[in-house]
Image (spheres, grey):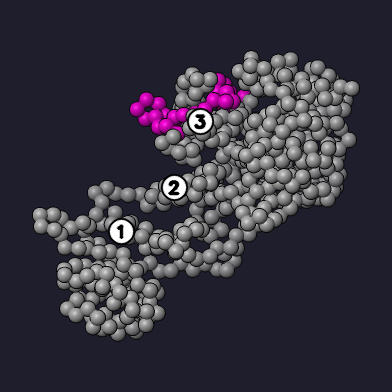
């Protein structure tokens, strides 16, 4: 019988002989050996020996050395006519410990994200992360957890030594980390490879490569719900529409269902390089439709405006998402409409999935007073993490367009506002609407919003010397009223739905006369 144990900490050279002598005395007739690093102890004993008794005897002996013993392999004698339950595994040489400086233990969060969609969120403000070592997974049940470091190492060693097939170590690691994020139960958690993380940061800048859709997870049916299609995007040109649910990706025999692949992994299949095709099947009003869309570089225009056809004194500004360039685009749209003698404004955040905290804070600063509370965030223990207030701020990084000057604060406060929203207005869009509501600066028109009142942060693993990035939910956030709206949504002052005919069309293609919700918003300004 062969038994292999891990030793923590490893036995140094000065004590190797003494340890082997003690073990041999405890196990008469056994052969005892240590690996070169002193981290693995291998014992060859008679088949009749009880492995549990061996472990108990050794554990007591090694405690006197200050060494923790853990069994990692056991080869029992085969039953007559059968094979051993596992092949012999040579203990792997221990790798040198990786050391990091104290500064790398405190790393900044790249982003504070208030968004539904992976394809449409961007970066924000920061705080600090304290990394602590640990040998078990998760935040609960650690008393029953296995030592994952040894277990993963053992499984990896078995595959390396006995698998018929070669394995790609980086691919194994990436897929394992993606599975970890998915298994946490946090539907917004995701691990990004180096390439995916670079694409995410590129998206932050307001530029992207893809088909031009904003999405969230669909539960019934299981799939990817398209909540917005960017104007003039490949998806719009192909006929993809808000409300479509992607249920499978690929075509023919190569098609995989979102239900089997998983939400985050399926999103990866939608992404790709410019010039390549994204093939997918959607359900629309009970009908199954197939699309083949050529991916392209997309210049995201997240804020644009025009004068109302119904009332030339009303300017209509649409915000499709809150990215790092949205504040300057919004300001340009507002100033352009003011120059055209608009004195009242409808701000349309329908189908807006949210985005960057710095972005929405900057735009709200144009309507609020200095020192006004914008948002408060709370951790899982219910304690306040931080609060954001209107202030003069200058960014010298990629968020430069989110800077706020003294002159910016309250520059549009005097104009009457109506905010258009619907069931796909989420996260930062909800914060925008609810904050203006709380300060009694706008009338909300449309339908109850999505209801996402939780905050995600993106971590750059490069600060610790690793490639890629990680996103996870870190807390709840509330508007100035202090009422969290997660899974509840924001109710409008004036509730109105689109007509059945209008709801069947792309929101961007509706005329002003067809848009019942916009017409209701325009009536807000009538005496």
Residue shown at the point (88%, 25%) measured from the top left: 341
Q: Earlier in the sequence, mark 1 or mark 3?
A: 1
Taking the spot 46% from the left edge, 50% from the top edge, the residue there is 180
Q: Which label lies toward us, 1 or 2?
A: 2
Q: Is residue 161 above or below residue 287?
A: below
Tell me the quarter of the image containing the C terminus: top right
Inter-mark Cα distance, 1 to 3 = 42 Å
Residue placed under numbered mark 1 in the picture: 157
| Label placed on residue 220 | 3
Question: What residue sits 84% from the left and 20% below the top?
Answer: 312
Q: Quadrant of the N terminus?
A: bottom left
Is residue 508 shown in magenta? no
Query: Is label 2 in a helix, a strand or a loop?
Result: helix
Marks 1 and 2, Cα distance to the nearest angstrom? 20 Å
Q: Characterize the local packing of mark 2: few (<14), some (14-19) or many (20 or more) Cα atoms within 10 angstroms.
A: some
Region of the chain picked out in magenta, as a range: 232-258
**Which label's residue is closer to the chain start, 2 or 3?**
2
- Residue beneath label 2, please? 179
Tell me which residue sits at (58%, 38%) in the image.
Answer: 117
Q: Are marks 2 and 3 in contact (CB under 8 Å)?
A: no
Across and down, in percent, residue 287 comes to 49, 19
SS type, badge 3: loop
Q: Position of residue 468 (x, y in %)?
A: 51, 50
Mark 2 or 3, which is nearer the eye? Answer: 3
Kindly indicate the quadrant of the structure image that contains residue 107.
bottom right
Q: Residues within 10 Å of mark 1 (few under 14, many from 20)?
A: some
Q: Please, what secondary structure does the residue beneath circle 1 have?
A: helix
| Nearer mark to the viewer, of 1 and 3 | 3
């Amino acid at each position: 019988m062969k038994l292999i144990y891990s030793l923590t900490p490893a036995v140094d050279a000065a004590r190797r002989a003494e340890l082997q002598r003690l073990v041999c005395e405890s196990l008469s007739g056994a052969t005892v050996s240590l690996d070169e690093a002193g981290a693995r102890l291998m014992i060859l004993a008679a088949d009749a020996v009880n492995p549990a008794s061996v472990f108990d005897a050794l554990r007591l002996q090694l405690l006197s050395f200050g060494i923790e013993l853990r069994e990692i392999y056991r080869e029992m004698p085969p039953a007559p006519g059968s094979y051993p339950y596992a092949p012999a595994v040579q203990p792997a040489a221990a790798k040198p410990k990786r050391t990091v400086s104290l500064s790398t233990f405190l790393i900044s969060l790249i982003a504070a994200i208030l968004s539904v969609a992976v394809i449409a969120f961007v970066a924000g403000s920061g705080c600090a992360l304290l990394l602590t070592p640990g040998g078990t997974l998760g935040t609960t049940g650690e008393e029953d957890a296995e030592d994952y470091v040894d277990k993963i190492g053992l499984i990896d060693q078995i595959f390396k030594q006995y698998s018929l097939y070669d394995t790609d170590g980086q691919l194994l690691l990436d897929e394992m980390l993606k599975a970890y994020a998915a298994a946490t139960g946090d539907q917004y958690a995701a691990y990004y490879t180096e390439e995916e993380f670079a694409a995410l940061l590129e998206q932050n800048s307001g530029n992207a490569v893809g088909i031009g859709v904003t999405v969230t997870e669909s539960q019934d049916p299981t799939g990817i719900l398209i909540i917005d299609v960017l104007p003039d995007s490949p998806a719009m040109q192909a006929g993809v529409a808000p409300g479509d649910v992607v249920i499978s990706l690929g075509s023919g025999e190569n098609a995989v269902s979102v239900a089997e692949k998983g939400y985050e992994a399926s999103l990866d299949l939608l992404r790709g390089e410019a010039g390549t095709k994204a093939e997918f099947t959607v359900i629309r009003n009970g009908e199954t439709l197939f699309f083949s869309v050529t991916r392209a570089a997309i210049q995201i225009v997240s804020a644009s405006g025009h004068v109302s056809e119904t009332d030339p004194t009303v300017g209509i500004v649409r915000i499709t998402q809150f990215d790092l360039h949205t504040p300057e685009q919004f300001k340009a749209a507002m100033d352009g409409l003011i120059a055209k003698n608009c004195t009242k404004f409808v701000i349309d955040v329908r189908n807006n999935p949210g985005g960057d905290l710095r972005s929405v804070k900057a735009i709200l600063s144009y309507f609020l007073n200095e020192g006004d509370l914008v948002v408060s965030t709370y951790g899982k223990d219910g304690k306040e993490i931080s609060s954001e207030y209107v202030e003069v701020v200058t960014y010298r990084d990629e968020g430069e367009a989110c800077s706020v000057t003294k002159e910016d604060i309250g520059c549009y406060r005097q104009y009457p506002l109506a905010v258009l929203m619907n069931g796909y207005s989420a996260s930062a869009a909800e914060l925008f609407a609810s904050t203006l509501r709380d300060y009694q600066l706008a009338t909300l028109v449309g339908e109850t919003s999505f209801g996402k009142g939780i905050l995600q942060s993106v971590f750059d693993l490069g600060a610790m010397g690793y490639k890629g990035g990680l996103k996870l939910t870190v807390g709840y956030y509330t508007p100035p009223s202090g009422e969290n709206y997660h899974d509840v949504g924001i109710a409008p002052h004036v509730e109105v739905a689109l007509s059945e005919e209008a709801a069947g069309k792309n929101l961007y293609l509706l005329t002003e006369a067809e848009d019942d919700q916009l017409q209701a918003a325009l009536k807000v300004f009538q005496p």
